[in-house]
Image: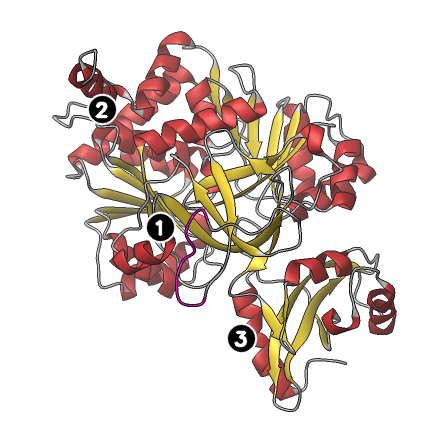
Amino acid sequence: MSSYNVKRFRNLFEENFIYINNFMRNVERYPDYTALIDGESGEVWTYTQLNETVNRLANAFLSKGVSAGDVVMYQLLNRPEFAFIYLACQKIGAVNCPINFRLASGETALILEDSQPKIFLYDEAFADESEKALEISRHKPEFSFKIKSPDFSKLYDDSAPKEPNTTFTPNAFEEVTRLYTSGTTGLPKGVPLNNINEILTAHDVIMHLGLSDKDRLLNLSPWFHRGGIYIGGPNPGLYVGASLVAMKGFLPKEALNIIQKYSVSVVIGVPVMFTLLIEEQEKKKIDLSSLKAVVSMGAPLEKKLCTKMQEVFTPNVYNGYGTSETFWNTALKPEDLPEMAGSAGKSCIFDSIRVVKVYEDKLAEPTDTVANNNEEVGEVIIQTFKTSMDYFKKPEEVKRKFYKGWFYTGDLAVWDSKRYISIRGRKDDMINVGGENIYPTQIEEAINECDLVTDCAVVGVYDEKRGNSIAAYVVGQDENISLDELKNFIKKHPMIPAYKRPRYYRIIEELPMTATGKKQHYKLREQAKEDLKKGLLLR
């Protein structure tokens, strides 16, 4: 029996542990602080101005018939309007649902049918695809609007800047945001996030990076995914009282200029972005002295790139690993790098991480872990309060991925005695050659050490004569990459025994990637089947 009034605190918590409340505290605390900057036009919003714009938009949504629980879907670049929508939905209890702007029209149509938004807002930059999706979708939103920066205000010009008048009562457990997974294994799934998830995610980033109201954040990756909106995007920045710079699309030269012009203190991106930034910086020598932290995510950070990032940007380099469902859950901090580069790091503040055994017919018990010897491979499982423990309308997927309070990622890894996790690939990506399990990541890391190579991906392909074989898709530093030199490099590599060497190669211009910089091996597996038939895989 409790020694205090639990109900009173529970009611306080449920009604007030709300993300938007802290944004409003910042409006009161920092009314004249810069909240948001449009990196393209230079337009600036203080916290007071941002709140007024958000109120106008929220009132416009109400006038369009949006009510608590309705979905507002938006398919946008990193533009100020993204932040307006993210906050406006929370003011009236609508579910904000940002989706990938790189989707084909058919994929967007499936998501429209899945979430059935009342409003659909889309970017002028890819309006043709979005409008085609609206045509073919069986669900027709009641209102849709193409967003152009000068024209967007027409949506809310006639609305009042006062707080929206609504009977909606916020609740800590109510869905605030619905994201869609990045699709490394197939069609995206809807991931509901509540206020508790929103707030603990913000706190996680603020604590790990030491953010404050003095910081200025620039996330180079798209905001619509978990690592975009929640690392250096609207979620942590507007929660802590910092300022955000919105940059529509990644261009290395422009990104460096923005860092210098606006004294950006924290930059977030994926490894390939930092490679391109380094190349540009070595030509231009921009003043980057304002940087206090650089965060790489979406893929393992290899030691060679990490060392270069520390030299060019700041010694304070971070790398995170996680999922759309659970946010980031392990981290490498500056004190870990570059020594531990290539690993995913140790568990984050709110998280427990284990590597458990893999069975064909069942999920391992959370206590059925593999040895901490950096050799035995198992599946990464995560326990965190940054997930709602659910998918939207996918009960079978919930059974397959959530068990006894743990999320089963499908990622294969090893861990050492200090509990540093090193990802070896996905269960679906594992290649069995001659009875031996081979993990693409190890081979990819070795190939990427070659100076001829920009990036690569390794997949299995079935050869009728030889059974499963390894195929490497390679992006060269230039179009004249020598396959013989590359094969000789791999042959001499101390970490790649003969049975792990690729049998087939294909030189390509770019790898299929998710918006978070994760390689889509499943697409290359399908391509490899066709390439083998057509004789496009080289030996």
Q: Which mark's residue is nearer the viewer, 3 or 2?
A: 2
Q: Secondary structure at mark 2?
A: helix
Name the secondary structure under disc 1: strand
- Looking at the image, the residue that sits furthest to the left is 167
Picture quarter with the N terminus: top left
Is residue 94 within the magenta segment?
no
Q: Which residues are magenta?
A: 360-367
The residue where tag 1 is placed is 402
| Disc 2 residue type (three-letter) | Glu
Residue where numbered disc 2 is placed: 14
Tell me where residue 535 appears, x and y as whole percent. 67, 86
Measure the C-alpha gap from mark 1 to mark 2.
Answer: 24 Å
Marked residue nearer the N-terminal end (3 or 2)? 2
Q: Which residue is mark 3?
A: 526
Which residue is painted at 42% across and 22% down in the image?
Answer: 239
Figure check: 25 above or below 314:
above
> Label 1 is placed on what type of residue?
Phe
Residue at horizontal 69 percent and vertical 46 percent from the top: 342
Residue 439 position in % (x across, y down): 63, 63
